[in-house]
Amino acid sequence: MPRIVKRPNMFAPKQSRSMGEMNVTPFIDVLLVLLVMLIMAVPIKVHVTEVDLPGEPRIEPQFEILAENTVAITNSDQLLWNGNPVTPEQLTAQVTAASAMEEEPLLRFEPAALASYDTSARTITLIKDSGAERFAFVGSERYRDWD
């Protein structure tokens, strides 16, 4: 005679115990819907409106602009435009005026051997931001030998 094996019914109601975990599926569904709504509500940047704001007063160039101009930095980190001492603002005005000319003059950059690297880097950035396109490093061949 065959043996009958009784298996427990997994779907039968068990003793009534309270469930210890919270069902978070509806909570996640609501958060995903809110996230999608937020993404759709953010406006897309489609155009740019440029507004001319008042800036700093323009400083007119004080020195003559030649076919080749030299920006030098002394050992004491003083800026020179063709041998004349200038401030960074005056140098910006000089370079801007030179770069606005029909035929832009060559701008030669000549720092002294003991000039600060920070001052040199700031001056190069100032020249670049002023719109100069014809730019040359000169005088560095003097420092080829470190004896």
Image: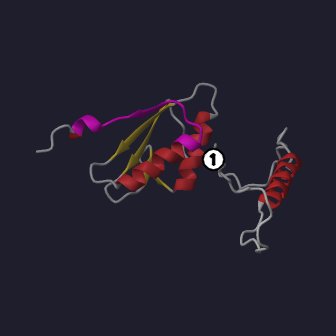
Q: List x then y, in percent, for residue 88.
A: 52, 54
Above or below — where is 63 with respect to 115?
Answer: above
Task: Tell me, yes or no, if residue 44 can be seen here.
Answer: yes
Q: List x then y, in percent, for residue 118.
A: 40, 55
Q: List x then y, in percent, for residue 55.
A: 74, 55
Q: Which residues are magenta?
A: 128-142
Residue type at mark 1: give it.
Answer: Arg
Q: Residues within 10 Å of mark 1 (few under 14, many from 20)?
A: few
User: Of 67 and 91, which appears nearest the observer?
Assistant: 91
Which residue is at 57% across, 54% downward? Answer: 89
Task: Tell me, yes or no, if residue 84 can be seen here.
Answer: no
Is 61 left, or right, of 86 in this rendering? right
Which residue is at 54% across, 37% downward? Answer: 65
**Residue holding disc 1:** 3
Is 18 left, or right, of 83 in this rendering? right
Q: Let me know if residue 141 is in the magenta part.
A: yes
Q: Quadrant of the N terminus?
A: top right
User: Of 43 and 3, which appears nearest the observer?
Assistant: 3
Is 20 left, or right, of 91 in this rendering? right
Which residue is at 34% across, 60% downward? Answer: 76
Which residue is at 77% across, 62% downward? Answer: 24
